[in-house]
Amino acid sequence: MDMFVIQGGYPLSGRTTVSGAKNAALPIMAASLLADGMTTLHGVPDLVDVDTLAHLLRALGSQVERTESGDLTLEVLNTRPNLADYELVRRMRASVCVLGPLLARRGAACVSLPGGCNIGDRPIDLHLKGLKALGASIRVERGYVIAEAQRLRGANIYLGGPFGSTVTGTANVMAAATLAEGRTTIEAAACEPEVVDLGHYLNAMGARITGLGTPFLQIDGVERLHGVPHTIIPDRIEAATLMIAAAMTHGEVRIDNVRVDHMTAIIEKLREIGVTIDVNGTSVRVTTSGRLRSIDCIALPYPGVPTDVQAQLMALLTCASGISIVTDKVFPDRFMHLPELVRLGARIRREGNCAIVSGVGELSGASVMASDLRASAALVLAGLAATGESVIRRIYHLDRGYDQLEIKLNQLGAQIHRMVDEPQNMPASLTLSVSDKAEDTSDPTHELRGPTWLKRMGITPRTEA
Ligand code: EPZ
């Protein structure tokens, strides 16, 4: 298991480029199950989640290969397999996106219910509601969704849920409806750019979808879809993460391959905080001048501030002057990063789906634990800004959804070292050496009372009277 050892305090400078969007690539890869012939995807990021889904698609009869030039080719060779096994689906929720395409193209699907998740409840009731409306018979048995349909039929579907629209739910139902008989309408559809990108791919394959980017989709079913070339949109969440990295280190960074039209809410919030963002086509230049300002921020479905940037924004606000309130109305429990940021010296209190962040002058390095993809990114950003060394464990969470993030950051001047998580790799500043331990090992706090280590931390050891 890997960890990052980060030496904080280095302002980032230079130029970097955003990779393709994970949350567009995954549903598009799943939708390739609908096609006759080969799909060639350009700009698919190099991620563990992409590899996981490729593995699942191969198990479902597709040939999936990465070409020399980095493109991903996908072609269905065998339409008989229809089991998406728990061992694969548990690793990545987005695997559920194969459900709609399998049902539409093969008339049957057996997909494991996705496993648990550190960002909160993630039911798929809306996915199943939509597919049932299209005429599928669906039952859930022994942790699997078993779906069957001779031929899906168009329907009018309301897909809104208690937290607004569903991104992958919209992807699943929209993809299935492309081969249904007749017209399907989806109200309260997700408007995220990644859903729009999927719709563009489907229409290029021969689907007839209108209303993309609006909450009202209309899909007229067709007989068949064919494989096509498609370029994945840039990852707006990675772009936001890189922008915040530049801001937190008070550096000056130019970021290329940015779709600023997908980032209006994020850019507005960063400017409200005091980050200077100069836009030049698909490049942005990020700088700061002086201390950042506290703000209130609410994560909402698109076009609101994305929940996938909530943790990173919280990291930024830990060093802003004043008190900020960060609310997540999409995943009300998405705060696993909060106690880890506190270990880095942040002052944050949680109240339900809100976090009250009192800005501190600076963060200080510590050993912390990543818990999910975006929380990991937030901890990396905080480690870049903190004085001294930080260690971030379980960095495999980051590898799921960021394409070589530490390499991009180190090319901008960060000091991030990926190491195997072993005691000997822990920095001296964050470890207790044997001599530091107080003689009285029966004392439960003896770990904390080692004189040398405390002195290193600038704490005068207590001396027994
Ligand atoms: C997608 O997840 C993204 N993942 C998530 O990104 C992102 O956070 C999320 O959308 C919201 O934008 C992918 O696209 C692969 P939802 P998804 O269905 O589709 C509730 C990342 O870090 N809901 O839009 O699973 C749900 O509980 C990941 O890249 C239902 O109630 O999210 C949540 O509160 C994390 N019933 C809200 O809707 C359902 O059937 C939004 O969920 C489905 C969802």
Image (spheres, rainbow, N blue to C red):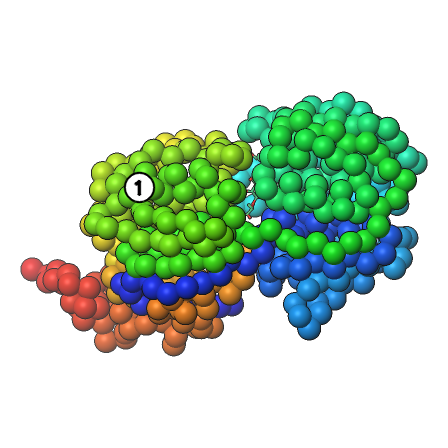
Which residue lies at the image location 65% right of the left edge and 45% below the top edge? 197
Image position of 96 (left or right of 363): right
Quarter of the image with the C terminus in it: bottom left
Q: Secondary structure at mark 1?
A: helix
Image position of 131 (left or right of 53): right
Image position of 149 (left or right of 207): right
Q: Residue furthest right?
A: 150
Which residue lies at the image location 81% right of the left edge and 43% below the top edge? 206
Q: Is residue 168 above or below residue 401?
A: above
Q: Is residue 181 above or below residue 55?
A: above
Q: Nearer the viewer, residue 217 or 299?
A: 217
Ligand 1 quadrant in view: top right
Which residue lies at the image location 15% right of the left edge and 63% below the top edge? 458
Q: Residue furthest front?
A: 281
Neighbour tally class for label 1: few under 14, some 14-19, many 20 plus, Cα within 10 Å: many
Quarter of the figure with residue 132? top right
Query: Where residue 168 sits: x, y (%)?
Result: 65, 40
Query: Where residue 316 sits: x, y (%)?
Result: 33, 48
Q: Is residue 341 visible in the rendered structure shown here?
A: no
